[in-house]
Amino acid sequence: MKVLFLAGSHPRHMYIAKKLYDNQYLDGLLIEKRENFVPQPPEGLCDLDKNNFIRHFKDREESEAKFFGKITDVIFNDSVRKIKVNKEQLNSDKVKKWICDFNPDVVLSYGIHKLSNEFLSILPAYSFNIHGGLSPWFRGNITLFWPFYFLKPNWAGMTVHYLTERIDGGDIIHHSVPKLFKGDGIHDVACRAVIQVAEDLITILKLIEEGKKLKGVPQGTLGKLFISSDWKPQHLRLIYNTFDNDIVDRFLDGELGYDEPKLVRAF
């Protein structure tokens, strides 16, 4: 069974690539070069919002370094066929030919930009996207942030769904949610979610290898498609100034109530 992973270049994306590689489930790797991992604060912010912005992305960098370490594609030996692209090259004829020549049995994507319908048409039946959020409730962008903003940290998780032209809208195979620990901040939970979905992916690939048919669950109309412009630096005031990044502790202490998502499981 040949597995192709279409991945972004950030630490969380490369962590999953390494997990697949370590379990002999990585035969091909496409890496899309993503934007700088630590962005500069926008112009015009007041000191409060500028400091929160700097803290937020500095903490994210430190948390991902703690959980994932430094992973580059050089660790993957010559048995893994690799190609590097940028956003503009992703849907090019060159890349589509590379995919066709590789002829994968399973395709996984995580952290790349939207694939064209023509690109999708050349992929095998078992083609899944790994979405950093619980669909259908949190689809689109920055979807591991919003559960914290809405004070529902137990709704921070990942979705494995069939890859379709609909943004995070394909039939769901599996939801992954991490265990919450006292002392976890927003980025710690996001990292734990990535680690959990990586573990779950290995089990899912073993099921496919054993011949199990994975029937997805159609997504309903609940939830929201979050777009990048929905998020503003001012939203960080709730995370850091109101709660000082202790939302998990408050939740585990019972201060925030409890509402459990209805999860889809492949196993």
Image: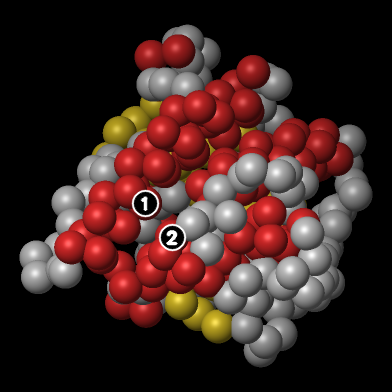
What element does badge 1 sit on?
Answer: helix
Q: Position of residue 64 (x, y in %)?
A: 47, 35
Residue 116 in sight: yes
Q: Is residue 113 left or right of residue 35?
A: right
Residue sitting at 73 percent across and 35 percent down? 199
- Which disc, if any, is residue 214? none
- The answer to whether residue 72 is above or below residue 115 is above
- The residue labelled by disc 1 is 56
**Foreground residue among 16 and 208:** 16
Q: Are marks 2 and 1 in contact (CB under 8 Å)?
A: yes
What element does badge 2 sit on?
Answer: helix
Residue sitting at 61 percent across and 60 percent down? 247
Residue sitting at 51 percent across and 47 percent down? 187
Residue sitting at 65 percent across and 76 percent down? 136
Q: Position of residue 72 (x, y in %)?
A: 39, 21
**Foreground residue among 182 and 231:** 182
Q: What's under tag 1, amino acid-wise?
A: His
- The answer to whether residue 228 is above or below residue 25 is below
**Foreground residue among 245 and 23:** 245
- In the picture as drawn, the residue positioned furthest to the left comes out as 43
Q: Position of residue 34 (x, y in %)?
A: 29, 45
Q: Quadrant of residue 95?
A: top left
Residue 145 in sight: no
Q: Is residue 91 left or right of residue 225?
A: left
- Which numbered disc, 2 or 1, marks the residue that appears first in the sequence? 1
- Within-10-Å neighbours for mark 2: few <14, some 14–19, many 20+: some
- In the picture as drawn, the residue positioned furthest to the bottom comes out as 221
Q: Position of residue 124 (x, y in %)?
A: 61, 51
- Which disc, if any, is residue 240? 2
Q: What's under tag 2, amino acid-wise?
A: Tyr
Q: CA distance from mark 2 to mark 1?
A: 9 Å
